[in-house]
Amino acid sequence: MAGRLAAATLALIGCTACSAPPVPHQVIPVASTSCAPSSPPGGVGAPMGDLPGWHQIFVDDFNRCSLGSSWSLYSGQPGGNPNGWWDPKMVSDQGGMLRLDSEKTATGWISGGVSNHGVEQTYGRWEIRMRADNSDDISYHMLLWPAGNDWPPEIDFAESAGPRTAISAFLHWVDTDGENAQSGATVMGDFSQWHTVGVEWGPGVVRYLLDGVVWAEAHSKVMVPNEPMGLAMQAEAGACQQREELGLPPCDPSGPHPDHVGVEVDWVAVYQPLPSELARMQQAGPDPSAIQMTKQ
């Protein structure tokens, strides 16, 4: 549920290409082979090329010694969250991974966050290979944010506040009465280990993916956005406070509270839907094996 928390500071997401067509298929060039690991840290290599119904327009396996121009760094206090600060120095590209670190300092928590500058589109598929250190203090948020920075909408496809035993997904929209609305769902798992999280988004439908399988979805012309959006990935302090706001069980004082917490991303892949896939998504009904998200 990162929209309220991040609304003020996600202005760092680039909008210079909001009206431009998707970028061509590309692999971010490796700046130095000495920075590439001998094998993928996440155990599964970055996907290269198209999927059935989907044209790959962007992929980054972070096998470089620097982040590169496709990513913008967060700086400043997350909107509505006084518990931490985004600091660009908490983002690094090392060992074939993007790292979003958080550190407890004498003046409070500092954390890292990035946005996928210039790779915004209306409808698509995004996948991230990631894991996170156990921490009750640090949350992470993998989401799609509107290219125009006018919130809502927002599509959160992997969030964790507290123990890495589950991730949650949220959808934010403006309802027919002009009021902000949201829906959410949760799936269990050990997310201190590597998983591939993702989302498929088309006209009137959003599908949330875990290791390639749809686990939750929303079917609604009102709930589902239809404007350009781009990927943002962030770590934030204040997870215990967020759990209280969500009505979740409070943090355990004896739980994991390390002073340094890492969120690791092995790769990111972005796809544009083919017209045939958009038609298929619109015609498909609810998946009986998936959680159906409705207005809360």
Image: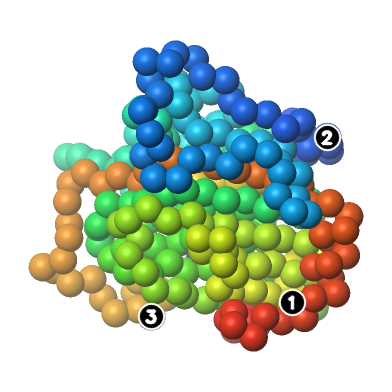
Residue with the mark numbered 2: 20
Task: Work out whether residue 251 or residue 60 is closer to the camera in this orientation and state it.
Answer: 60
Label 1 crowd (10 A; few <14 / some 14-19 / many >=20): many
- Assign a secondary structure to mark 2: loop
Residue type at mark 1 is His
Residue position for label 3:
247
Q: x and y percent of residue 89 in the render?
A: 36, 28
Front: mark 2 or 3: 2
Mark 3 is on which residue type? Gly
Residue 208's spot in the image, x, y percent?
Answer: 59, 66
Element marked by disc 3: loop
> Which residue is farthest left?
254
Numbered tag placed on residue 219 in the rendering: 1
In this view, 73 is above or below 125: above
Return the x and y of residue 6 as percentages of the image width and height: 51, 52
Q: CA distance from mark 1 to mark 3?
A: 26 Å
Which residue is located at x 84 percent, y 61 percent? 278
Determine whether, in the image, residue 11 is placed left or right of residue 281.
Answer: left
Residue at (40% x, 30% y) in the render: 96
Q: Secondary structure at mark 1?
A: strand
